[in-house]
Each structure stands twice: as structure tokens, then as C-alpha cells.
Image (cartoon, grey):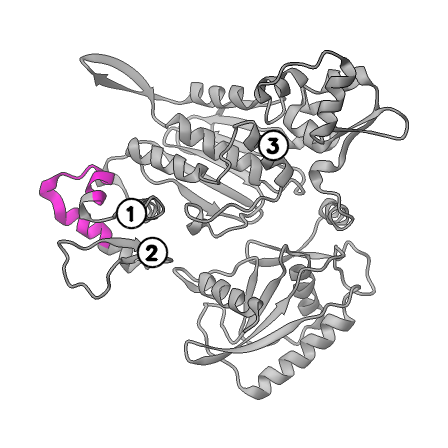
């Protein structure tokens, strides 16, 4: 069996369980539409998508496989092949396979990522290009088209020019080089040229043919002294908004960061922590105040938002919103991995140079364990589980303030139990009634409440027994649905 077929099957399963949802990598189709242009748009979107994608025929809009007969399959394959070859500016070579899925024949069509982007509709200009967003096929913006062109020619966003043809002194005026060397724990070079060569070696700046320098997006976005000086990056500034109450009706304070992500990171985290409410606790007969949210969780989730945002999306940037009952962190771009697999799946970064440098600066985790660390800290604080949201062109994480178990909704309890199971699984720790009671601070006398939470999570299809053949409930343990 070809590698792509097995990958497609696993992607299809992920889209159907535990909750059916179309993915950026896969689109269900009950049958083939007679609208050739719309089909061409789908092919364009998958050909522009990282690693391509799959059209799956024989699955209805609710995610129920119903299968197809041979006649239908032959018609679909022939028509798709013709559209892929003739209706796009770059002819696309597609592959197909018929598999048995839940006892019915399903047609999977593989559309590989095209090397020349953007892939657009034949007879129109390149701005008639499409992409996958939140499981839908949508038109690409003009700025995103230019970004795809840069990628197609081998120029990543980080290496595109933010400011061109400036002299030595201007580079040092715009770039916070002190912060770079401090975070790297390196001493400043003895000469200006030595300093500039170091920045150039990190791809923060590059020499140009006029014997001057170009500041690259990587240098500007990480180490700008004032990001507003870079016109194409102004909207990438981080905004922190504090609201009164639990709605967005009454914003009482808004702060927009002007420093680069790396040079301003500590200040950003400290500013967020300063805005948070505190709880008073007693330890060793002494009263002290602690923030309601753990510093580790704030730090890791903010770093993740910075690294995994889609920098090609214009007009928006990272937004951190603080309410009385929660804190929300939103970044542009849908996640590249399933939100249910944030804990166990190695991260995929759109911005590898940015991510790599931020890891070396110890701003984020090298191994992609930042989400694990954040959720572990939230469990220690016994807060409700964070909620991850995959929106249309954005990703959001919501961290909730302390909430008594009796006031948690069923959704809150299920989410916490699932995340607890994932965290323990990747740490090779058992999940059982006792561990769930500890997670929710449930007394030993209320074993049944922990059992109810476990049963709810099993019913939702998010966890399962580690030993399906065991009839013992007393010694039962549990693993995530994907284990």
C-alpha cells in the first residue's frame, strides 16, 4: 500500500472521531458536484496546502460513510483528472484509491502539494488562488498570494525584507542588539562590524549590493526597538486588553507592545501577570498572595501563540484578553495539528527560523513540551482545563479562573479529564479513579463523583479503558482514545 493511502486513512479517522469535523487536509464529499469551477477551487486549495490533502468521496456532510458504486467512482475519477489537468494554470497530477472503510467502498483522491505556488484557476490571474481554512475552501488574500510566491521561490517570511538599504548606524538604531546578546548570554563584539556580522549570521539582517544592509522580517519581528518603524509589520504588534466583567462590552485598558517578540517577551509576561487578580493563601502560618493563573502557563501559551501564528495573514496579530473569569490568547492562523492532540503531538511550525531562534533564547521549549508544562501547572493550581479553539483563520486558548467543581459544566469536567489522561499517558503515569480525584480535589468519600466524570469522558469517546478485557472497575485505568 502506498504511504499516502495509509496517511489518508489515518487523517480520515481523525476527521470522524471523536467528533466529526472536516480538516484543512481533508474534505468529505457525498458525490461529485457538477460545478467544475468549484471543484477546481478545491484542487487549488489542496495544491497550495502544506503536504497537500485529500478529497474523500462517499462520506456525507455529517461524516457518515455511505460508500459509492463502481460506476460513480469511475465517473468521479475521470472528471477530476480532467479538471486537475485542464482547469488550473499549473496542471496537477492526482492519485486515487478505493478502500474499504466501515464496510463500504470509499474513494480517496490525493492532491499533492505543488512546488510552484500559488496554484490558481486557468484563464484568470494568480489572485484567483484558494486555500484551506477551518476545514473550508476559501479565496487567498492578495498579501497571502505574494507570500506563497515568496515561498515558491524559496524565500520564507522570516527572510523577506522588512526595511532595505540602510547604513550601519541605522541598523543599530532599529534593532535591539543589546537584548540579542543578553538573551544569548554572549558578550558584545569589540567592533561595530563584528556586531553587524553576528546579526547577519543569524539572518536578522543581510548585506545588499549597495554595501548597506537590509533588515529581514526575522530581525524586525524579534528584536525591533519599535515595531511601528516597520510598515509591513505594524499589525504584528501584540495587544493586551483588560475588560471589566466577563464580556467584551467594557474594555478598561488596552496596551499595544512595540518591542520585538524576543526583546519584549519578559516585559510582556510581567505586564500580563501584573494585570491578573490574586488569591490569598496561608503557608506555614504566613499569608501571601499568588496570581490566580500560573506564570508557567501564561509564558508557554503566549510563546506558542507567537511561534505558531500564520504571519502571512494581514491586518491582525496576537491578542491577549483578560476578563474577570478567564484569559484568552488568540493568534492568526489555524493550528497545523488537531487541537485534541496538542499534548502528545510534536508541534509543526510555520515559522521554523523564528521558532528555532526563540528556542535557543530559552523563550520556548525545544522539544515541543510547552503545552504539557502549561497544563501540568494548571492541574497543580487545580484550575479548570484550558479550552483550545480552532476558528476560521485563528487559534485561541482560554485559561479559566478558579471554579468550584460543583459549578463546572459537564463540558469542563470532560475536557479536564481528557487532558489529565493525555498528560499522564505521555508521562507514563496511570489514570484511574484516584488520579482523577486528585485532579479535581475530590474527597475519598466521593469516589462515585470521580467515576461519573470518567464515565462521561468515555461516553464522549475521548478516553477508553487501558484493558478492554478487564471487568474490574476497582482497578480500572484509562488511556486517551488515540492511544
Q: Secondary structure at mark 2?
A: loop
Q: Are marks 2 and 1 in contact (CB under 8 Å)?
A: yes
Return the disc, 3 or 1, that comes first in the chain's sequence: 3
Seen in the picture, residue 452 relative to 372 is either above or below; the reply is below
Q: Could you tell whether 432 is left or right of 135 in the image?
A: left
Q: Nearer the viewer, residue 31 or 45?
A: 45
User: Residue 439: within the magenta?
Assistant: yes
The residue that mark 2 highlights is: 462
Q: Answer yes or no: do the residues labelled 2 and 3 have beta carbons within 8 Å?
A: no
Q: Horizontal and vertical percent for residue 95?
A: 64, 73
Write down the region rendered in magenta: 435-454
Image quadrant in which you'd find residue 162: top right
Kindly identify which residue carries mark 3: 357
Q: Quarter of the image containing the N terminus?
A: bottom right
Q: Is residue 448 above or below residue 18?
A: above
The residue sitting at 26% across, 58% down in the picture is 466
Amino acid at each position: 500500500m502506498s504511504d499516502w493511502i495509509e496517511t489518508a486513512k489515518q487523517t480520515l479517522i481523525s476527521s470522524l472521531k471523536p467528533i466529526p469535523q472536516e480538516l484543512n487536509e481533508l474534505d468529505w464529499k457525498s458525490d461529485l458536484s457538477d460545478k467544475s469551477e468549484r471543484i477546481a477551487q478545491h484542487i487549488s486549495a489542496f495544491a497550495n496546502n502544506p503536504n497537500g490533502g485529500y478529497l474523500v468521496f462517499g462520506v456525507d456532510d455529517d461524516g457518515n460513510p455511505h460508500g459509492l458504486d463502481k460506476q460513480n467512482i469511475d465517473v468521479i475519477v475521470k472528471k477530476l483528472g480532467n479538471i486537475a489537468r485542464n482547469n488550473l494554470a499549473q496542471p496537477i497530477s492526482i492519485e486515487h484509491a478505493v478502500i474499504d472503510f466501515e464496510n463500504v467502498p470509499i474513494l480517496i483522491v490525493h492532491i499533492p502539494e505543488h512546488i510552484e505556488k500559488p496554484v490558481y484557476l486557468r484563464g484568470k490571474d494568480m489572485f484567483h488562488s484558494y486555500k484551506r481554512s477551518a476545514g473550508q475552501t476559501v479565496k487567498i488574500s492578495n498579501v497571502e498570494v505574494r507570500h506563497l510566491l515568496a515561498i515558491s521561490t524559496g524565500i520564507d517570511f522570516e527572510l523577506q525584507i522588512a526595511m532595505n538599504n540602510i547604513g550601519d548606524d541605522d541598523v543599530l538604531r532599529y534593532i535591539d542588539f543589546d537584548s540579542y546578546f543578553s538573551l544569548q548570554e554572549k558578550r558584545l563584539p569589540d567592533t561595530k562590524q563584528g556586531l553587524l556580522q553576528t546579526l547577519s549570521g543569524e539572518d536578522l539582517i543581510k548585506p545588499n549590493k549597495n554595501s548597506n544592509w537590509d533588515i529581514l522580517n526575522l530581525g524586525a519581528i524579534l528584536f525591533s526597538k519599535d515595531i511601528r518603524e516597520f510598515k509591513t509589520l505594524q499589525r504584528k504588534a501584540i495587544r493586551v486588553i483588560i475588560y471589566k466583567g466577563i464580556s467584551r462590552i467594557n474594555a478598561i485598558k488596552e496596551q499595544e507592545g512595540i518591542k520585538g517578540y524576543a526583546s519584549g517577551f519578559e516585559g510582556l509576561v510581567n505586564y500580563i501577570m501584573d494585570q491578573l487578580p490574586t488569591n490569598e493563601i496561608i503557608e506555614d502560618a504566613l499569608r501571601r498572595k499568588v496570581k490566580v493563573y500560573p506564570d508557567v502557563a501564561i509564558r508557554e501559551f503566549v510563546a506558542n501563540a507567537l511561534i505558531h501564528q500564520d504571519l502571512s495573514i494581514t491586518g491582525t496579530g496576537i491578542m491577549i484578553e483578560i476578563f474577570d473569569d478567564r484569559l484568552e490568547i488568540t493568534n492568526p492562523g489555524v493550528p497545523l495539528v488537531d487541537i485534541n492532540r496538542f499534548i502528545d503531538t510534536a508541534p509543526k511550525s510555520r515559522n521554523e527560523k523564528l521558532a528555532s531562534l526563540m528556542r535557543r533564547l530559552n523563550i520556548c521549549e525545544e522539544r515541543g513540551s510547552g503545552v504539557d508544562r502549561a497544563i501540568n501547572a494548571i492541574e497543580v493550581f487545580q484550575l479548570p482545563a484550558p479550552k483550545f479553539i480552532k476558528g476560521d483563520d485563528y487559534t485561541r486558548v482560554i485559561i479559566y479562573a478558579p471554579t468550584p467543581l460543583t459549578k463546572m459544566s459537564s463540558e469542563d469536567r470532560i475536557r479536564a479529564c481528557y487532558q489529565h489522561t493525555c498528560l499522564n499517558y505521555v508521562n507514563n503515569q496511570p489514570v484511574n479513579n484516584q488520579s482523577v480525584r486528585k485532579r479535581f480535589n475530590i474527597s475519598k468519600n466521593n469516589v462515585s463523583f470521580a467515576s461519573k466524570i470518567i464515565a462521561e469522558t468515555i461516553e464522549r469517546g475521548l478516553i477508553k479503558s487501558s484493558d478492554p478485557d478487564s471487568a474490574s472497575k476497582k482497578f480500572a485505568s484509562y488511556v486517551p482514545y488515540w492511544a
